[in-house]
């Protein structure tokens, strides 16, 4: 049986004209997804040479929403791109060392790009759904493979740039009649699929779209009309968070104060409208009332510009202890929240007290507070 060759695939849909246009859109999606992913990774670093900004308060909500939406719409783009170019994989290697090297480099970049892209998309979508059927760290693996994917993408673009420029500068001609689907028809169908994927996902971050975003991982429902990722039962804090003897410890050097919930309620209360924005792409706004973190730090003589180690009542988990960088600790909008939308915090939202800060990843908005300690 004769092996297929590129000339056996006669459809005009398998060609550089469609591939260049779909590939350009895919490159933009990958670029936006990569840059917003880097931003999210940096925001979660305990040590930040350049302080992460506290304003705008909704900044992380926008960037993480873009991250998940662009990652999702990359799925149909990648599938169409692979379908348009797969006949080229049957092309025999050219003669001549230089041409052979260029072809080998191109195919290697495609192999690495496709493998890393599939890994990124599959694990990213699974993370959005909070489904982890693997034993490796999602965050570190996703971050490392992202660099591999982007490196392969840059190499692929560099090899194909002359062809891409030629095809994008050429008018897309319609084929003679008789074709089941024209090149323009395929592109229109692709853009429609991209639009549907975006609408079906964006509702996690855009409340107005939640009714049509069937792929949105959070509907906005939850205690006090705000979603939760981890319940008090899942965190194992039901008993400790509701214990009569609970008190928040605030420490700086040898100065320590312990404040019960009643003590905290007796201090000056501030109210701020701030979003919870999670790495899975969902976000929602709430009206939070509580005590400024800066006021609590002043009570133990902590100077401005101090990082704060925040500890939760959780007994385990990667975010049981987090670092509240100085910029957030000194921001007037950063609260030890005691109430949400005018009602005492629900247990699943961090009762008896939780941290809420502007423009901060949701995983760092520590619930069920136990201790605030100024770093030495």
Image (spheres, rainbow, N blue to C red):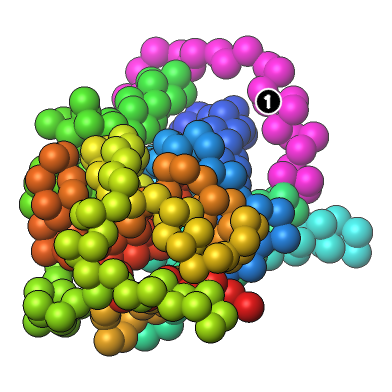
Judging depth in this view, the residue of 16 and 152 nearest the camera is: 152
In the picture, measured across the screen, residue 360 lies left or right of residue 91, that is left
Indicate whether residue 171 is drawn in magenta: yes
Q: Is residue 54 visible?
A: yes
Judging depth in this view, the residue of 128 and 309 nearest the camera is: 309
Q: Which residue is mark 1?
A: 167
Image coords of residue 84 (percent x, y): 49, 41
Image coords of residue 316 (percent x, y): 31, 86
Judging depth in this view, the residue of 49 and 196 nearest the camera is: 49
Q: Residues within 10 Å of mark 1 (few under 14, many from 20)?
A: some
In the picture, measured across the screen, residue 326 lies left or right of residue 267, that is right
Identify the residue at horizontal 42%, vertical 82% (top origin).
Answer: 136
Identify the residue at horizontal 79%, vertical 34% (top origin).
Answer: 162
Would you identify the image quadrant in which residue 119 lies? bottom left
Image coords of residue 284 (percent x, y): 26, 41
Q: Is residue 57 above or below residue 195?
A: below
Quadrant (top left/top right/bottom left/bottom right) for the C terminus: bottom right
Judging depth in this view, the residue of 4 and 273 nearest the camera is: 273
Mark 1 element type:
helix
Identify the residue at horizontal 74%, vertical 28% (top origin).
Answer: 165
Q: Which residues are magenta?
A: 157-182
Image coords of residue 244 (percent x, y): 9, 77
Quadrant (top left/top right/bottom left/bottom right) for the N terminus: bottom left
Indicate whether residue 193 is drawn in magenta: no
């Amino acid at each position: 049986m004769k092996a297929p060759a590129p000339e056996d695939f006669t459809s005009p849909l398998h060609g550089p004209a469609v591939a260049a246009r779909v590939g350009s859109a895919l490159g933009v999606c990958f670029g936006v997804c990569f840059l917003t992913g880097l931003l999210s990774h940096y925001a979660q670093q305990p040590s930040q040479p350049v302080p992460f900004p506290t304003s705008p308060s909704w900044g992380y909500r926008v960037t993480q929403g873009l991250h998940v939406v662009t990652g999702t719409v990359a799925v149909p783009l990648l599938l169409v791109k692979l379908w348009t170019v797969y006949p080229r994989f049957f092309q025999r290697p050219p003669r001549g060392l230089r041409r052979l090297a260029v072809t080998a480099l191109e195919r290697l970049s495609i192999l690495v790009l496709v493998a890393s892209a599939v890994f990124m998309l599959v694990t990213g979508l699974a993370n959005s759904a909070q489904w982890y059927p693997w034993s490796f760290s999602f965050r570190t693996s996703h971050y490392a493979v992202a660099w591999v994917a982007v490196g392969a993408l840059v190499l692929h673009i560099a090899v194909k740039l002359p062809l891409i420029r030629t095809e994008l500068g050429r008018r897309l001609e319609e084929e003679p009649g008789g074709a089941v689907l024209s090149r323009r028809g395929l592109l229109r169908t692709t853009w429609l699929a991209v639009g549907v994927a975006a609408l079906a996902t964006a509702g996690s971050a855009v409340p107005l779209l939640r009714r049509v975003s069937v792929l949105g991982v959070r509907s906005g429902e939850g205690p006090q009309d705000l979603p939760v990722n981890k319940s008090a039962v899942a965190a194992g804090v039901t008993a400790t968070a509701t214990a009569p003897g609970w008190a928040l410890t605030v420490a700086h050097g040898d100065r320590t104060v312990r404040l019960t919930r009643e003590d905290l309620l007796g201090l000056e209360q501030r109210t701020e409208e701030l979003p919870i924005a999670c790495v899975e792409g969902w976000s929602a706004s709430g009206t939070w009332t509580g005590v400024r973190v800066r006021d609590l730090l002043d009570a133990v003589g902590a100077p401005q510009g101090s990082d704060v180690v925040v500890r939760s009542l959780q007994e385990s988990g990667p975010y049981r202890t987090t670092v509240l960088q100085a910029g957030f600790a000194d921001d007037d909008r950063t609260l030890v929240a005691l109430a949400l939308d005018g009602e005492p915090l629900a247990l699943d939202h961090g009762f008896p007290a939780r941290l809420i800060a502007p423009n901060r990843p949701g995983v760092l908005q520590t619930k069920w507070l136990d201790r605030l300690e100024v770093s030495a």
